[in-house]
Amino acid sequence: MGAERLSEQLEQIVLKRIAEDSLILPTLPAVVTKALEVLKDPDVSFKHVGTIIERDPVLAARLLRLATSAAFAGGTKKVTLPEALTRLGAKAVRGLLVEATAQKVFVSRDPKIADSMKRVWQHSVAVATLSRDVLALSGNADSEAAYLAGLLHDVGKPVVASLLLEFERQVTEVYNRPFIDSAEWVAVIGRTHRAVGVALGEKWNMPEQVTRCIRDSAEYDNADRASLVNIVCFSNSLAKKTGIHAGTIDADEVDALVMIGRSIIGANDEIIKTLTRGLKERVSNLYD
Amino acid sequence: MATILTVDDSRSVRTIVAKQVKDLGFEVEEAEDGVQGLEKLGGREYDLVLLDVTMPNLDGPGMLAKMREAGNKTPVIMLTSESKRSVVSGVMKIGIADYILKPFKPEELRAKVLSVLQGEGGAEEVLAVSSDPAPQAPEPSSQARVETGKQFVDVLVVDDMENVHKKLRTMLPNHITLNGVTSAQAALQTCRQRVFRVALVDTEIPDVDSAVLAQQLKVLQPHAAFVALALRTTNDVMGEARAQGFDNVLFKPFNQDNVDDFLGQYFDNLDLLSAEENVLKVAAFTGRADRIDKYFARIAETYGSLLNKVAAACFEDVVLDVSAAPTTGDKLAKFLLSSADQAKQVGMRFAVVGTADLQKILNSYTETKELRFYGSVPEAQAAAQA
């Protein structure tokens, strides 16, 4: 079987599993699911939320650290988890819970993909940061969805990559046949990751506009200039143009997307400079 | 005068484009498809082509390819409703200066046409690198409006406690304009409508990450300085603020010394002494009476460098117009004496322009009564030429 044929078959298997709802997707941890559920109540006490999150000490420590680093006026006093959550606010806590879960999806123990998945995660954080800032051009402060949409736009990639690893083991070890080369790997991921990402977004009950971005943000939407899809598409191209990406990119296509985005978003040269100034440093501060 | 060719199969688009371009003072000619466009280009030279993508007979990419094949390097802006990356990437490879998506705003068309015609090249490499210096703040309050047509305001205060805005207002001179907002949403809306010199952002707004908000506001206010409003703590607040992307910190609760330092950093020094040829003009004092020493100290700091510029321009005389400066006490007289000495050291004749009150004061001191004094700048200049 030729590599091209095998690649097509793998793609079909991935898409078929999604269609049949038999694709094994990462789940939200029970603690996160419960915390997100109670945070829907605007009157929920952060003491109650804290009690739930404390069941996952790693997650609790992460939120504490973020709350402390974001604070200016905390002095030297140690803050409790409920105090940290209060300081962050419900919106930020919701976003951080999803972010912490998503980051785990991008962590692989397999040396073949670990490094590139880490770079995809770094790219995702850059796109999320840019999306949140680009949203400001519309005067909209509700940046939670923009950040999540940017963060999750490539979330299908590590899932497909893990699946391909599994296929590779079967093909090479069980059937003793050669597997597809790295270029075909990238091609299969490129053709399937959005469908997988949408399935994951739906499983995690992400807002509809977030899953729409995962599905559609490869191209701009002329019909709705102010859409989140356009913001993520533009941010994605700017992050790549800034050099924050995994693997090789088509530089001509990136240039085209930046040029289209300047017009569709209404971003002039000065705005683009402001958006990208210090981006690598800002994003690198967010890596664990 | 530059002449622009608009190539579009839609008459209404050509009409709108022609009007916009003529309003800019350029000539415009029209073609309704690529074939006509190439014929026009064969007949004369144009400075810019505005080119649609989808047209009958010969489409935009086809016309562009034939232009470039024939060695025609006229800049082209694609003006199209086509936003597929593969299409735009294709025409970029052939060579376009910029791209405008239909329907377009007149200001986008005007800005991009002017950018290309003025040799800026349209869409160029504009990504900032990490080492880029921070942007410079815009001109101060004397400039009531900026070129964007947006209202200019000196200070934006973003703090959920309205009392913070009120308190700061009472501590700032009246000529410093201030807008206060209590939410992130209001801050973003205000920043879309106005241009600010300095944005003060509270670091403890409920449910808001101030660093994120500041970064969002920077996108809308690329020239503004961003100052964190923070409480005094044992932490390295300045270090934390800088790490979060702020330029500076103003501590709450405010005290007048801190506010005056803030003013000195972002406002006071800018216009206190201005130069026009060999005339140096001192601005009025608008602060509190107990800050007058700082006022004269800042003028004195600026005087030396401006005097050197006047001397470097080969003027023989320097005229110091202090008509607006306060005459109470002996600060002004001492400043003038020092200024005259400095002028003498660089070999320049020194003249003072001021009020009748000042003339009386200067005449009352042995050290200053010999200074050349005039009631107006034209009088001083006429005396210098005599």
Image (cartoon, coloured by chain):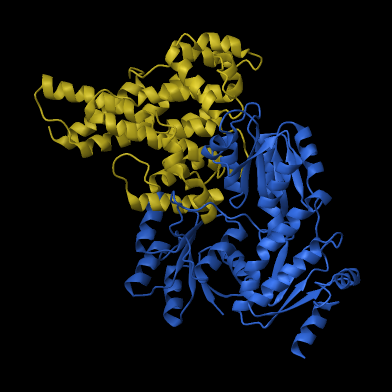
Chain colours: A yellow, B blue
Q: Which residue is drawn at 56% across and 25% down?
A: A92
**In the foreground, B208 or B303:** B303
Asked whether residue B376 appears in the rendered view, the answer is yes
Query: Which residue is most to the left?
Result: A176
Relative to residue B184, is residue A128 drawn left or right?
A: left
Q: In which quarter of the image is residue B323?
A: bottom right
As displayed, is residue B356 above or below residue A247?
below
Q: Quadrant of residue A233?
A: top left
Residue B101 is situated, as x and y percent measured from the top left of the image, at 52, 55
Task: Please identify the quadrant where the N terminus of chain A is shown.
Answer: top left
Residue A159 is situated, as x and y percent measured from the top left of the image, at 32, 25
As displayed, is residue B314 above or below residue B181?
below
As displayed, is residue A161 above or below residue B73?
above
Relative to residue A150, is residue A70 drawn left or right?
A: right
Q: Number of marks in the image? A: 0
Residue A152 is situated, as x and y percent measured from the top left of the image, at 43, 30
Q: Residue at x 56, y 14 (%)?
A: A80
**In the foreground, B224 or B66:** B224
Asked whether residue A15 appears in the rendered view, the answer is no
Q: Residue at x 41, y 36 (%)?
A: A284
Relative to residue B18, is residue A272 drawn left or right?
A: left
Residue B289 is situated, as x and y percent measured from the top left of the image, at 83, 51
Query: Which residue is most to the bottom?
Result: B386
Task: Please identify the quadrant where the C terminus of chain A is shown.
Answer: top left
**In the foreground, A133 or B264:** B264
Q: Quadrant of residue A237?
A: top left
Relative to residue B383, is residue A226 drawn left or right?
A: left
